[in-house]
Image (cartoon, rainbow, N blue to C red):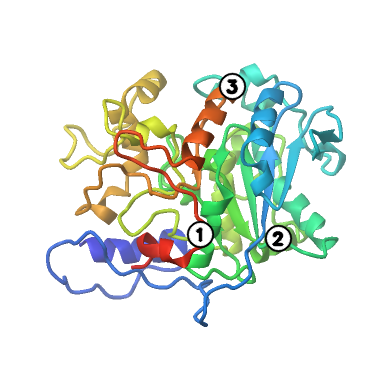
Amino acid sequence: MADNYERVLTSVWHRHEGVPEYWLASPGPPTCQRPRLPEPHELHSQPPLVNRARVQCLVLTVFPGEEERMSAIVDTYAAHCDGLVFLSASAAPENFRGYLVVDLRAYFGEMLPDPDPELVGGPGVNINIQEKLNTIQKTLRSFEWAAWLMKGMQKKPDVICRLDSDTMFFPQNLLRIMHCRNFSADVPWALGHENYLHKHQEPGQAFLSGGNGICLSRAAVEVFEAKARQGEIRESTSPGDWNTGLCVSSPGHWDDVVFGVCLAQFGIPLSRWGTDCLGRTLFWPLPLDYALPGPRQILPQKVPPKVTWFHAPEEESEVRRDPRFASYYHWRYRAWQHFACSPTAWIGDFPVSLHPYRDGAQAREVFAAVVEHQTMLGYSPKLWSGNLDQCHDLLC
């Protein structure tokens, strides 16, 4: 069952293709590491990529409400991006500590101004203020703006990542995936923390969690801009239109869900390499301590729940405070892929991103822990040094 589930998940959810016409015979008991089919954007020529890929970082932010987060970004991962731009929809200086700040309202007339950070900076999102939020608009238009920027660049980026201001990002470890799997920037693909469930939309499309960063190849950004030019991104003033199953630029917060619809509509596949061969997540969707052994650790359920799988936690506070409920959203449709795996921590050794880190001091602290390879409860995060000998967990 696991092998057939893997095929269906890849074909339908990730590559936007049809259900396979036949089922595979069982090869025997489930094993942890199962072979994965090469992805369409993986080059078959040898040797692997010789030149280091270029990473463009686009950070969605609010000024001045998130100025401290912007400072933390400059102090941590900004220098490891080949280019970093802060994207806002508020009055801000054109430059922040040496990095460009762009007000997207100057380019996109439908863009709402940034809301008060207090509306979106708490533990949850108030669904009653969707008409005041511009996250969907900012995410869709950020990639369109990036395509315009690329046209004037002599050295174009290979991958463009849209990040939240509370994302902790490690570009070196993104490069590891691209080089170890020999990704081509000339073929459309998207990479991030794959998600198969949204609590306010089911069924829907697979999507990449926005908080962890959504990375597109150069070719995917060009496809996205071409589709926007052809009018395939609809515009709406209704905050309820995010849930219509259309690629629509509208008020609202659920940008990653809408963006997943756009990727499916435009035929841009979601890479499976947000997860390594052992089933460990490389784009960890929570603070690091939720991955480590202890009472808050996120683990897959090994036995069926006492209620139906369709029974979601009823209180938002439960989701935030109880790792069992956090596990519900993280593992649904995911656990079967790696049912035979039992790693100590379900985060890979080379994390690409962590989320959320809204406090600047905590962001700097976790960045230092990864950069310095600190060992925490048996887990030692690493940064890719450029050595292809560090690809073992991506070769299956």
Asked which quadrant contains residue 380, the reply is top left
Which residue is found at the position 50% from the left and 73% from the top?
Answer: 40
The residue that label 1 is drawn on is: 176
The residue drawn where x is 24% and y is 72% is 23
Q: Secondary structure at mark 3?
A: loop
- Whole-percent x, y for residue 262 in the image: 60, 54
Gap in angstroms between the C-alphas marked 1 and 3: 32 Å
Structural distance between the alpha carbons of marks 2 and 3: 31 Å
On the question of residue 151 being in view, the answer is: yes
The CA span between labels 2 and 1 is: 16 Å
Q: Is residue 262 left or right of residue 303?
A: right
Kindly state the secondary structure of the residue where label 1 is placed: helix
Q: Amino acid at mark 1?
A: Arg
Q: Is residue 32 above or below residue 320?
A: below
Residue 104 located left or right of residue 24? right
Amino acid under label 3? Answer: Gly
Q: Nearer the viewer, residue 375 or 183?
A: 375
Residue at 46 percent across and 51 percent down: it is 206
Is 139 rendered above or below residue 191? above
Residue at image x 32%, y 49%? Answer: 334
State the residue position of label 2: 157
* Residue behind mark 3: 121
* Count of numbered labels shown in the rendering: 3
Contact between marks 1 and 3 (CB within 8 A): the answer is no
The residue closer to the viewer here, 314 or 360, is: 360
Of labels 1 and 3, earlier in sequence is 3
Label 2 vs label 3, nearer the camera: 2
What is the x, y in percent for residue 28? Answer: 12, 68
Q: Secondary structure at mark 2?
A: loop
